[in-house]
Image (spheres, rainbow, N blue to C red):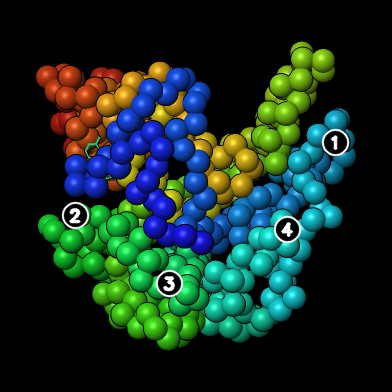
């Protein structure tokens, strides 16, 4: 893996000092602005524990579409039409002969082993300290999950196993946000703020992490400060990854005009209704998070011109233009849900402040700076009422 490519991206300029991404050529709506694989990613701990079957390396679903639908609807009788359009190829699957984690392909197995798994393989040992670390993490961080301690373990192992440690360390350094280095220097309070972890929880996780993750050369990450800075990097930059074999199947069948689309629409709606009843719409996907070098530079806007997608059904991220973008324009995504973008400036800023800890300075917020400070919750709740309620 090459860690030095990132500064040269065709059609884009990464403004390291100004901290953003600017187009250097025009893009049309739906154009791919860039596509990238994560530096490292990992499925969430509860998501894996609940049986969301994903490749341990790239998070590609391992179930067939029918298996997925049956599990999420808790209905073993459902028979899926057009199973030949299911993207899962079980004959390509593989697993680690020592610890039995599963992969979608020999390639993923080999890549994982070469990059981090050799260091972290638990050899089917359920008393392994890494297993204990994961269990303790799960007691602290319940769904809906935002990250996993296993991503931190992978980062350490990635550097441990890298032939060119300096290159990957330089790359990781760029994930350390200016705010960490400047205004706030105590990493445990940064980690506490970003991940909502108490000081004692961080200390407890740190003790287990030191026992579980062999770091011969990266001893500095095994100090409390080093461990907290890893938590902070993951908390501030972890990009959510979601994969679903059912949604891939839906995309495929609905793109075929020769199929009876009215009938299919009804079938798909019924399935989603059942899934909503059984597991809830927030729990349909294999979920995890990863560090992406290029995406990490993309700022938020309440009027985004780009969106992050995972069209290949794995952790490969594609930044796609939502509208025509002219050379010279900044490329921004939305860090909040699309439906939340229509809310008042005050509501949007509140969400971004509470979840991402910054005051949004996007064009839309600046142009609405004179708007009254009311939330659009149900629009009439004033600031005083909100404070009273709190
Ligand atoms: C993923 S980084 C984006 C790159 C970032 N500008 C940097 O310098 O590293 C996210 C951080 O960028 C800043 N940011 C992103 N969008 C912003 C916006 N619309 N207004 C103000 N700050 C923003 C916030 O500090 C946020 O935590």
Q: Which residue is mark 1?
A: 83
In-image side of 104 versus 371 (left or right): right
**Location of ligand 1 given as a quarter of the image:** top left
Marks 1 and 2, the one that precedes in the sequence: 1
* For marks 3 and 4 on the same chain, the one whose residue lies earlier in the sequence: 4
Q: Are discs 2 and 3 less than 8 Å apart at CB?
A: no
Contact? badges 1 and 2 (CB < 8 Å): no
In front of the other: 126 or 319: 319
- For label 3, the residue is 164
Residue 362 location in percent, x, y? Answer: 23, 29
Mark 1 and mark 2: Cα distance apart in space: 50 Å
Please name whichever residue, 346 or 21, is drawn nearer the observer in this view of the structure: 21
Q: Earlier in the sequence, mark 1 or mark 3?
A: 1
Give the x, y percent position of residue 387.
19, 37
Q: Characterize the local packing of mark 4: few (<14), some (14-19) or many (20 or more) Cα atoms within 10 angstroms.
A: many
Whole-number angstrom distance, CA of label 4 to CA of label 1 = 21 Å
Instruction: Pick the quarter of the image with the C terminus.
Output: top left
Residue 332 appears anywhere in the view: no
Q: Dot 3: what SS?
A: loop
- Residue on which the image places disc 2: 179
Query: Which residue is at a point 19% across and 47% down the rendered structure image?
Result: 17
Distance in Å between CA atoms under marks 1 and 3: 44 Å
Disc 2 to disc 3, C-alpha distance: 28 Å
Q: Earlier in the sequence, mark 4 or mark 1?
A: 1
The Cα atoms of the two marked residues, 4 and 2, are separated by 40 Å
Q: Where does label 4 land, which residue?
A: 105
């Amino acid at each position: 893996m090459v860690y030095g490519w990132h500064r040269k991206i065709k059609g884009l300029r990464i403004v390291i000092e100004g901290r953003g991404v600017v187009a250097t050529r025009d893009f049309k709506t739906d154009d791919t602005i860039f596509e990238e694989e994560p530096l490292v990613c990992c499925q969430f701990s509860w998501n894996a524990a609940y049986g969301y079957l994903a490749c341990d390396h790239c998070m590609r679903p391992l179930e067939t579409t029918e298996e997925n639908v049956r599990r999420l609807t808790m209905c073993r009788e459902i028979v899926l039409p057009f199973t030949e359009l299911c993207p899962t190829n079980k004959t390509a699957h593989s697993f680690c002969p020592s610890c039995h984690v599963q992969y979608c392909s020999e390639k993923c197995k080999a890549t994982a082993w070469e990059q981090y798994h050799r260091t972290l393989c638990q050899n089917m040992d359920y008393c392994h300290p890494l297993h204990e670390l994961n269990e303790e993490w799960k007691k602290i961080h319940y769904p809906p999950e935002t990250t996993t301690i296993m991503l931190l373990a992978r980062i350490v192992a990635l550097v441990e196993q890298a032939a060119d440690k300096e290159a990957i360390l330089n790359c990781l350094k760029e994930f350390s946000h200016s705010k960490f280095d400047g205004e706030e220097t105590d990493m445990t309070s940064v980690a506490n703020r970003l991940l909502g972890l108490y000081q004692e929880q961080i200390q407890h996780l740190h003790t287990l992490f030191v026992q579980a993750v062999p770091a011969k050369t990266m001893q500095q990450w095994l100090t409390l400060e080093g461990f907290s800075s890893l938590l902070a990097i993951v908390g501030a930059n972890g990009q959510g990854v979601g994969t679903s074999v059912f949604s891939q199947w839906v995309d495929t069948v609905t793109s075929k005009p020769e199929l009876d689309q009215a009938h299919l629409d009804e079938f798909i709606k019924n399935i989603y209704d059942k899934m909503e009843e059984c597991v809830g719409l927030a729990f349909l996907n294999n979920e995890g998070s990863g560090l992406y070098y290029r995406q990490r530079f993309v700022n938020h806007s309440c009027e985004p011109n780009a969106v992050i997608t995972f069209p290949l059904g794995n952790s490969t991220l594609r930044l796609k233009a939502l509208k025509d973008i002219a050379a010279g324009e900044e490329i921004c995504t939305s860090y909040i849900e699309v439906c939340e973008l229509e809310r008042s400036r005050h509501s949007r800023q509140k969400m971004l402040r509470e979840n991402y800890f910054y005051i949004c300075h996007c064009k839309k917020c600046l142009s609405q700076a004179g708007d009254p400070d009311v939330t659009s919750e149900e629009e009439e709740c004033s600031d005083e009422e909100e404070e009273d309620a709190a």
